[in-house]
């Protein structure tokens, strides 16, 4: 009986731990040579119209020293993405993510040129 209770408690703890993780996106920005780009602005949009008009960004961040921007508490949907640094951007490739997996840390790499 005691063993069954311990297993049940462990199972509940595992389920709770999985629900704690919110849907996240980690964006690594690199240049055409593959070098990571610090200080790049990253914007996420839910719709193609907002992306095209560059309005209503649902999230914005700037890449850190390792070229990484982190977004938390997102919906499990695909996002349109604009990345810019100086006169370079991701136009022409990598402009939309795959559908994010809910309750997971999703990772993508975006090239700017």
Image (cartoon, helix red, strand yellow):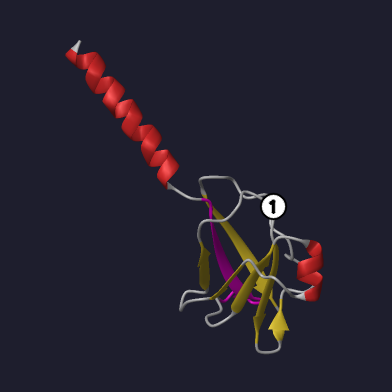
Please provide percent x and percent y for residue 6: 23, 22
Query: 50 left or right of 43?
Result: right
Q: Is residue 30 magenta?
A: yes
Q: On the picture, is 53 further left or further right than 32? A: right
Residue 40 position within the rendered picture, expressed as x and y whole percent measured from the top left = 59, 80
Q: Position of residue 44 (x, y in %)?
A: 65, 67
Q: Quadrant of the N terminus?
A: top left
In the image, residue 88 lies in the stretch drawn in magenta: no
The residue labelled by disc 1 is 98
Mark 1 closeness class: few <14, some 14–19, many ≥20 residues within 10 Å: few
In the picture, the quarter occupied by the C terminus is: bottom right
Taking the spot 71% from the left edge, 79% from the top edge, the residue there is 89
- Vertically, is 66 above or below 5? below
For the stretch drawn in magenta, the main secondary structure is strand
Residue 107: percent from left, percent from top: 56, 57
Does residue 32 appear anywhere in the picture?
no
Which residue lies at the image location 57% right of the left edge and 56% below the top edge?
A: 74
> Helix, strand, or loop for circle 1?
loop
Q: Is residue 30 left or right of residue 87?
A: left
Q: Quadrant of residue 88?
A: bottom right
Of 57 and 64, nearer the camera is 57
Judged from this view, the residue extending furthest toward the front is 56
Whether residue 80 sits left or right of residue 65 in the image: it is right
Image-quadrant location for residue 111: bottom right
**Position of 11 relative to 65 (above/below):** above
Q: Which residues are magenta?
A: 23-35
- Check the image and name the residue furthest to the left: 2
């Amino acid at each position: 009986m005691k063993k069954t209770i311990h297993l049940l408690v462990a199972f509940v703890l595992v389920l709770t731990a999985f629900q704690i993780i919110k849907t996240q996106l980690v964006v690594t920005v690199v240049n055409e040579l593959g070098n990571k780009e610090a200080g790049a602005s990253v914007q996420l949009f839910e719709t193609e119209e907002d992306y095209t008009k560059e309005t209503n960004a649902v999230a914005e961040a700037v890449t850190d020293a390792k070229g990484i921007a982190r977004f938390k508490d997102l919906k499990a949907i695909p996002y349109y993405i604009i990345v810019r640094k100086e006169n370079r951007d991701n136009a022409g490739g990598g402009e939309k993510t795959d559908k994010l997996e809910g309750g997971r840390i999703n990772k993508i790499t975006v090239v700017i040129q």
